Amino acid sequence: MNNKHPKITIVTPVFNQVEYIEKTIQSVINQDYPNLEYIIIDGGSTDGTVEILERYSDKITKWISVPDSGMYDALNKGFAYSTGDIMGWINSDDIFLDGALHNMARLFADLPQVNWIQGLNSFIDSNGQLIDVCIPRKFSFIKFLNHDFKWIQQESTFWRRNLWDTAGANINTNFKLAGDFELWFRFFQHAKLYSASLPVGAWRNREGQLSSTQMDGYLQEVYSVIKSYPTTSEEKKVLIKLNKQNSLIRILKTFKVFKLSYFINKRDAYYNLKQIEIKYSHKLKRFIVV
């Protein structure tokens, strides 16, 4: 692996996205990253998307246009072709921000203990204008088990190939909406997620995205993933203690003494949880909150 410029694989799944796909492609190839593998998997578009792919074919490592069974099937096809040391995907209406790949390459090169990482959460409008940026929340496996999972921004998240391989080297196509969550859930069982205050990807807020019905379906899939996990006795103890702490915080908020309480600082608010995690860290290292 090139330590300064590790090979980065980016996969874009696309189907009939002629309005936005060119901006997505440009956001990837204009990164000017010297060791990029860019793969686009089209599901058989008929709206002019394929003509755009042909136009940029000399800038794309590989692209195909064949019918598939959905986005996660397309992603699996793309990652099956991939050879990069660092991996990620960008959907066909989202974009990478300037310096994204160089930022990720530097982080992974300088921090060998990091196996996956998320950058700043960024959002653009339908015209591609940046409308919001926020520091990513800190997540852990125990939080996911406790239904605290909103949200890891997929377009700002990258991982090492060894984590991908260890976690099964696939995205579960049994899930039509929450395949990303199910992948994060598996990643957490092998490595902790780190956060960085660097610009990476931006999610496009536009018409035609998840409706309330689809969001209900997404959450149903999420809860099914969590429910299917065989929680250990140690994990149950941590969850009980965490829920007791959250109940106390809710009570303090209700009586408007939260700001005067010990829990005013977010770091302090998780102090008890961290102590619990330290207690079990010899058995449950994935519980450590970054």
Image (spheres, rainbow, N blue to C red):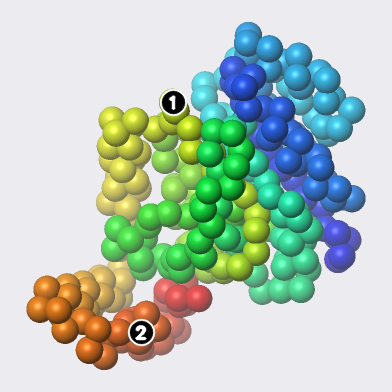
Q: Which label belongs to residue 265?
A: 2
Q: Secondary structure at mark 2?
A: loop
Task: Locate residue 235: give its quadrant.
Answer: bottom left
Task: Locate residue 217: give its quadrant.
Answer: top left
Query: Relative to residue 6, is residue 132 drawn left or right?
Result: left
User: In the depicted view, which residue is nearer to us: 57 or 208?
Assistant: 208
- Answer with mark 2 or mark 1, whichever residue precedes in sequence: 1
> Which residue lies most toward the left here?
255
Q: Residue at x 87, y 65 (%)?
A: 4
Q: Quick check: can you spot residue 183? A: yes
Query: Relative to residue 99, is residue 228 drawn left or right?
Result: left
Q: Which residue is mark 1?
A: 208
Q: CA distance from mark 2 to mark 1?
A: 39 Å
Circle 1 packing at 10 Å, graded few (<14), some (14-19), many (20+), is: few
Q: Secondary structure at mark 1?
A: loop
Q: Residue at x 63, y 27 (%)?
A: 20
